[in-house]
Structure formats: structure tokens, C-alpha cells
Image (tube, rainbow, N blue to C red):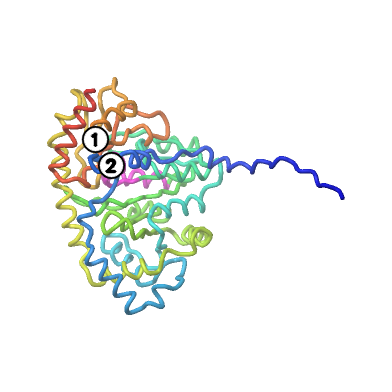
């Protein structure tokens, strides 16, 4: 009898190169480290859970499960439930951008919309332009797609249109990604003239604009600025992303994108390959909520509380940060951006700050190019004014060392 030879097991094939090159989210890593209840966490971008409309959301889910269980628990179309898209289209139209239900694709959070756009638009090696600093998870999406990511130089009003035009001519990018209203991480808002100038560059030179708007309804001061997507120069080349995460609840994972037909169809195909469709029961519950509840009134109540918390952070920030620090006063959203003097490295300082049971997010990970290591992001919406005051006292001790 012949005995078969036994060889040592071979190693499995390696991960894809793009997976090996993309690091995890520093924000998620910080949240894992600071999960202790005694930590006052200014690091996360978490809505205040005590402000969720638990009764309204629960009633909406009960209704669809009692009145339409067969539909709610069944597969749905990839594009999204018609009832939800109709109501989202009506809200978008009421805010100055005429929209039909068929202009929209419902996504599993607006983060998925970014992934679908990357699948539909980007080949490995394509160039993407972003703000400096930029929403961190967008950098992850574009990096995972194998894109070459370049930051557009800018100022306090956002990306500089002349610098954008130069980059478009020289680098031939596929798209510009921007969060123009209450940006994550800086909290800044692009004024209307800057939005018009960016739209004009996109029209003259051939460029997609991806306009991400998860925070726009959380306004505390000033007048609403129209979307870039509503500008005549940009209507045929702008994708507008929206989300229920900051105005209703992030746990229901509902977002949407509004895009020109050809690109929207490509995103539908990408979504079919990703998850077939967003959960039916969540969509129907959201549609029911919009039909019987006053979402605008709910957002107004949330914004009133968040305004008080923003003001509490602004009131104590001068005493908490070193002399020579600078920070902004956001008109809305969830974040405040600060810059310490050049000698400070907020990444290196974070462990001694966390030792004081408080946390922030260092600014460096938000940059696609050269990082400003003296910057940091603070989220002001999750804690009460009293907790914010105590957190800032701890922050001062941690930065002082």
C-alpha cells in the first residue's frame, strides 16, 4: 500500500492590495478606547440619544408591522420604497431643488451612497479632489477604491475656485467631494458666492461634484444657503447626498442620493451587487413617520438643545486651550475646529488628555496631504452644558500636562 506524502499546509492568498493600504478610522479607534462611562467624549460624532423621538419612531414601526407586515418584511426594489422616495422628493423640492421620486436612490446610510459613487465613477488610479481637511470616512472610501486623492487649497470659506480650476486642468480628476454646510470636521459653511464659483469651475472644465449634506438641517444661526446642486451650472453634474442619521436616528441607517439619470442607474447596479436594497421595514417606517409626524418641529427642538451646547463649549474654550489657540464659531452642525500653537501636536498629546477622562479627535487624520498636526475636532452635541464645562476643565489639565 502506498502512503500519500503529506506536505506542510500552504499559506492562504494575501488580502487585496487596497485592503492592506487602508487603515481603520481613528475616530472609531478612539471611541473604543474611551468607552468607559466616566470619560467625557468630545471625539465621537454621535447625536444626543436622549433627543431621539423614540415614541414617534416606535409608533411608525408598529404601524407598518401591524398594517403591512407582508410588505414590510419582504424584499424591496433596489431604488427604494416609492412612498419614502415621494416624501423625500417633496422635502427636497420644498427646500429649493425641484426633485421627483425617480431622481432618488435610497441607501443604507449616506456612507453607502459614497461607496456606490466610488464604484460607479472611479477606476483605480483616478484622481479625486477633496477639501482640506476632509470628512475622514470619505477619504477611506476613495482610498479603498484605489483613487489618487488630492486636497484643494482653500481658506475659511472652503476650497479656492482658482486653485480648483488649476488642479482640474492639470490633474484631470473625476470629482470634487465637499461637505459645504457645517462641514465635518471644521463646522464651516461655504457662502453662496463660493458655491457658485465652484459650480462654474465644474461646468467650464468638466467635473462631478459630490455634495454631502448630513448636517444642513441643524442650523442655529444665520440664513440657509442653497445647495450647490441647485445652482444652474451644477444641476447636471452634482450628486446630492442626504441622511436621517443626524435629524432622526442613525440606527435606522437611511440615506439617499439625488443624481443625474445615467449616474443614478450606475449606482443602482452597484447597490444590487452590495446589498440588493435597503431594509424595507426601515424605509416604510420612515415614510410613515414623515406622513404623520412633524419632522421639522422635531429638528427644531433638537437644534435648540444643540445651540445651547455649542454656546457652552464656546464659552469655556478660551480657558481650556493654550494661549494663542484659534477656533471657529459654527452656525450649525455638530463640530467645532480648533488650532493650537505650532508647538503642540494633538496626536501626541491625546494619551495624556485621555488620562484626564476626556477625549477629542486629532486633526491630522482628516488631511489628504500635509497635515496640520496642531488641529483638533470637538463634538459639542452629545454632552449637557454641565458636562461640557467639566470636560473642558479636564481638557485644560490634559493639555497642560
In this rendering, is residue 191 above or below 116? above
Q: x%, y% of residue 251?
A: 33, 57
Q: x%, y% of residue 300?
A: 17, 57
In this rendering, is residue 315 above or below 107? above
Membership of 7 in magenta stretch: no
Which is more toward the observer, 362 or 354? 354
Q: In terms of image quadrants, where is residue 37?
A: top left
Image quarter in which the C terminus is found: top left
Which is more toward the observer, 165 or 216? 216
Q: Is residue 63 visible?
A: yes
Read off the magenta span.
Answer: 179-203
Identify the residue shown where x is 24% and y is 36%. 358
Q: Compare marks 1 and 2 and give the one earlier in the sequence.
A: 2
Mark linked to residue 121: none
Identify the residue shown where x is 30% and y is 62%. 92
Query: Separation of disc 1 and disc 2 at Cα?
Result: 9 Å
Tag 2's secondary structure?
A: loop
Q: Which residue is mark 2?
A: 36
Which is more toward the observer, 186 or 45? 45
Q: Which residue is mark 1?
A: 357
Amino acid at each position: 500500500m502506498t502512503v500519500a506524502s503529506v506536505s506542510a499546509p500552504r499559506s492562504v492568498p494575501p488580502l487585496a492590495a487596497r485592503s492592506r493600504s487602508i487603515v481603520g478610522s481613528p475616530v472609531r479607534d478612539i471611541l473604543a478606547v474611551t468607552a468607559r462611562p466616566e470619560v467625557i467624549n468630545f471625539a465621537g460624532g454621535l447625536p444626543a440619544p436622549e433627543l431621539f423621538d423614540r415614541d414617534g419612531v416606535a409608533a411608525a414601526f408598529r404601524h407598518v408591522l401591524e398594517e403591512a407586515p407582508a410588505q414590510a418584511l419582504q424584499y424591496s426594489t433596489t431604488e427604494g420604497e416609492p412612498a419614502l422616495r415621494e416624501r423625500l422628493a417633496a422635502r427636497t423640492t420644498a427646500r429649493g431643488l425641484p426633485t421627483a421620486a425617480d431622481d432618488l436612490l435610497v441607501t443604507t446610510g449616506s456612507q453607502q451612497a459614497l461607496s456606490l459613487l466610488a464604484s460607479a465613477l472611479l477606476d483605480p488610479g483616478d484622481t479625486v479632489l477633496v477639501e482640506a481637511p476632509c470628512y475622514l470616512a470619505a477619504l477611506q472610501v476613495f482610498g479603498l477604491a484605489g483613487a489618487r486623492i488630492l486636497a484643494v487649497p482653500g481658506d475659511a470659506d472652503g476650497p479656492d475656485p482658482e486653485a480648483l480650476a488649476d488642479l482640474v486642468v492639470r490633474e484631470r480628476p473625476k470629482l470634487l467631494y465637499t461637505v459645504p454646510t457645517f462641514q465635518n470636521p471644521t463646522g464651516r459653511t461655504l457662502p453662496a458666492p463660493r458655491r457658485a464659483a465652484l459650480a462654474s469651475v465644474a461646468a467650464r472644465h468638466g467635473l462631478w461634484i459630490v455634495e454631502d449634506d448630513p448636517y444642513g438641517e441643524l442650523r442655529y444661526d444665520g440664513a440657509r444657503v442653497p445647495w450647490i446642486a441647485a445652482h444652474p451650472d451644477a444641476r447636471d453634474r452634482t450628486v446630492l447626498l442626504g441622511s436621517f442619521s443626524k435629524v432622526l436616528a442613525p440606527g435606522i441607517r437611511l440615506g439617499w442620493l439625488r443624481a443625474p439619470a445615467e449616474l443614478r442607474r450606475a449606482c443602482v447596479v452597484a447597490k444590487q451587487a452590495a446589498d440588493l436594497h435597503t431594509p424595507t421595514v426601515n424605509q416604510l417606517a420612515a415614510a410613515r413617520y414623515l406622513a404623520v409626524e412633524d419632522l421639522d418641529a422635531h429638528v427644531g427642538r433638537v437644534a435648540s438643545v444643540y445651540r445651547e451646547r455649542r454656546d457652552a463649549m464656546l464659552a469655556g474654550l478660551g480657558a481650556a486651550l493654550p494661549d494663542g489657540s484659534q477656533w471657529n464659531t459654527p452656525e450649525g452642525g455638530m463640530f467645532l475646529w480648533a488650532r493650537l500653537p505650532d508647538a503642540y501636536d494633538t496626536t501626541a498629546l491625546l494619551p495624556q488628555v485621555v488620562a484626564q477622562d476626556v477625549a477629542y479627535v486629532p486633526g491630522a487624520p482628516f488631511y489628504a496631504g500635509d497635515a496640520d498636526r496642531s488641529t483638533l475636532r470637538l463634538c459639542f452635541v452629545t454632552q449637557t452644558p454641565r458636562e461640557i464645562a467639566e470636560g473642558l476643565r479636564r481638557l485644560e489639565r490634559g493639555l497642560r500636562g
